[in-house]
């Protein structure tokens, strides 16, 4: 089944404790992206990747890192999480860009205390 | 990334009513996409539009690509309880021309 998977689905952590949210897609998509969703603010792009070893900042990259060592995986790294990073996070992928349909993972709900 | 203006922000309707929502952009788009997000899930693509003036249906959902290429509309006919969720419009304008999204229309159906 074609899908985007994320792990974990739920995470509660403390300020400053490094964490990684994994994302994997099995559709051989080149473009991958991370979003955060907050009430009233919609989906805001954190980082994106056009292909392996090609990543760039989205609209809200501060406090986040990503890597794209393999085409299928695009982990999101929070080196020192803070409470303002409490949010719902989505990974998405698409075959290309310029309006190409993106497929979303199920989401990761992160709480930083 | 570019912001899309989506309205209304929320809708409280009775079961059986028709629903209309719209989205506008400040620049011309060659693609409009409509997604639905149910509670606890990621957004799922409902309808994709690729041509100005195009009208596309998916069951009780109908979406239109505005002829100015700066707007799009989504209609839901005869709403049912499972239509509850957040509906997002999207178009090119994200990083390296991925997608940019409207802030969503939250649809609530009252029994």
Image (tube, coloured by chain):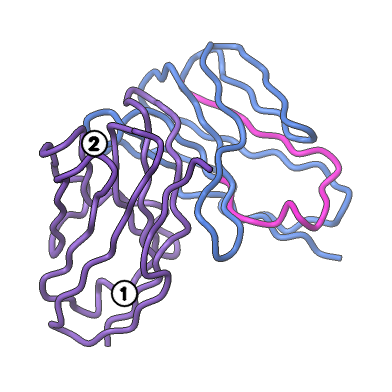
Q: Which mark is residue A66?
A: none
Quadrant occupied by the N terminus of chain B: top left
Number of marks present in the image shown = 2
Q: Is residue B111 above or below residue A34?
A: below
Place residue A54 in its image quadrant: top left
Q: Which element carries disc 1, helix, strand or loop? A: loop
Identify residue for label 2: B95
Query: Any idea which chain is the purple one in this picture?
Result: A
Could you say where residue A60 lies in the image, as x and y percent from the top left?
21, 54
Q: Secondary structure at mark 2?
A: helix
Residue at image position (63%, 39%) is B21
Name the chain letter of the residue that bears numbered label 2: B
Q: Which mark is residue A86?
A: 1
Image colour for chain B is blue
Foreground pick, A1 / B6? A1
> Left or right: A104 with respect to B77?
left
Give the residues in magenta: B70-87
């Amino acid at each position: 089944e074609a899908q985007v998977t994320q792990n974990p689905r739920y995470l509660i952590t403390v300020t400053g404790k490094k964490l990684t949210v994994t994302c994997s897609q099995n559709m051989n998509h080149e473009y991958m992206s991370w979003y955060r969703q907050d009430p009233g603010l919609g989906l805001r792009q954190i980082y994106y990747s056009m292909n392996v070893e090609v990543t760039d900042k989205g609209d809200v990259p501060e406090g986040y890192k990503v890597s794209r060592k393999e085409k299928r995986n695009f982990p999101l790294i929070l080196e020192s999480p803070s409470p303002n990073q409490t949010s719902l996070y989505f990974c998405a992928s698409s075959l290309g860009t310029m309006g190409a349909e993106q497929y979303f993972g199920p989401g990761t709900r992160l709480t930083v205390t | 990334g570019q912001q899309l203006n989506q309205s209304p922000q929320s809708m409280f309707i009775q079961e059986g009513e028709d629903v209309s929502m719209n989205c506008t952009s400040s620049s011309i788009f060659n693609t409009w996409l409509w997604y639905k997000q149910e509670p606890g899930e990621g957004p799922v693509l409902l309808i994709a539009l690729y041509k100005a003036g195009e009208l596309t249906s998916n069951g009780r959902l109908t979406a239109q690509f505005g002829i100015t290429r700066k707007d799009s509309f989504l209609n839901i006919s005869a709403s049912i309880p499972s239509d509850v969720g957040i509906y997002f419009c999207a178009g090119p304008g994200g990083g390296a021309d991925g997608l940019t999204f409207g802030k969503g229309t939250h649809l609530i159906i009252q029994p």
